[in-house]
Amino acid sequence: MSYTVKSSGKASLKSVDLMCPECKYEEERTIDLRECDTEELVAQAMIVKCPNCDHDSMEQVWRRAPSSPATHSLSDMHPGNISRMQQSFKERFIKKEVDDVRHKFGKLYDDGVRSAAAARIKKSVKKNGK
């Protein structure tokens, strides 16, 4: 049996993924928003100092989609946040694709790509050279 829990109002705890822009240290943190009544207090609560390199503030990154589209509409977000979210998704997607291919095929894939490129170069030189 499963239960559906519905709540209304503002969330009291917020889970965020943070990354340091200098040392690339990543951390998932739950921020307590119970006493944050205004947007300024929420913004101050989101400022987290990097425990690795003591940088002033860590940036929020997006490892997964927001939990509910109704609470996180893109029209409400700042344009800088949207561009950072898109860049984060793009970097993670490319890194995951490369890691998956290397994990599946290993060094043989890299050797195959190099030998195919060398064969194309030789073929074009031979074709254009004569």
Image (tube, helix red, strand yellow):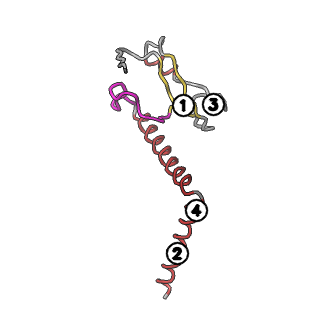
From the image, state whether disc 3 or disc 2 is nearer to you: 2
Mark toward the viewer: 3 or 1: 1
Tag 1 residue: 18
Mark 3 belongs to which amino acid? His
- Spatial CA distance of label 4 from label 1 is 36 Å
Of the 4 image quadrants, the one containing the N terminus is top left
Residue 54 placement (x, y as % from top left): 66, 29
Which dot marks residue 119? 2
User: Does 39 sit left or right of 107 as displayed?
Assistant: left
Element at label 1: strand
Q: Classify residue 107 by image quadrant.
A: bottom right
Q: Which residue lies at the image location 43% right of the left edge and 41% below the top edge?
A: 86
- The residue carrying pointer 3 sits among few (fewer than 14), some (14 to 19) or many (20 or more) residues within 10 Å by Cα, namely some
**Which numbered disc, 2 or 4, marks the residue that appears first in the sequence?**
4
Q: Residues within 10 Å of mark 2 (few under 14, many from 20)?
A: few
Relative side of 22 to 79, left or right? right
Q: Is residue 41 above or below residue 18?
A: above
Dominant SS type (magenta): loop
Q: Amino acid at mark 2?
A: Ala
3D distance between C-alphas at marks 3 and 1:
13 Å
Residue 18 vs residue 117, the one in the foreground: 117
Instruction: Read off the magenta span.
Output: 61-77
Question: Would you name the residue on which mark 4 appears?
Answer: 108
Q: Do callouts 3 and 1 mark residues in contact (Cβ within 8 Å)? A: no
Q: Position of residue 45 (x, y in %)?
A: 52, 19
Which mark's residue is nearer the viewer, 1 or 2?
Answer: 2
- Mark 4 falls on what kind of element? helix
Question: Residue at the location (48% across, 40% down)?
Answer: 88
Query: How far apart, in angstroms, are the residues tagged by discs 3 and 2?
Result: 49 Å
Q: Earlier in the sequence, mark 4 or mark 1?
A: 1
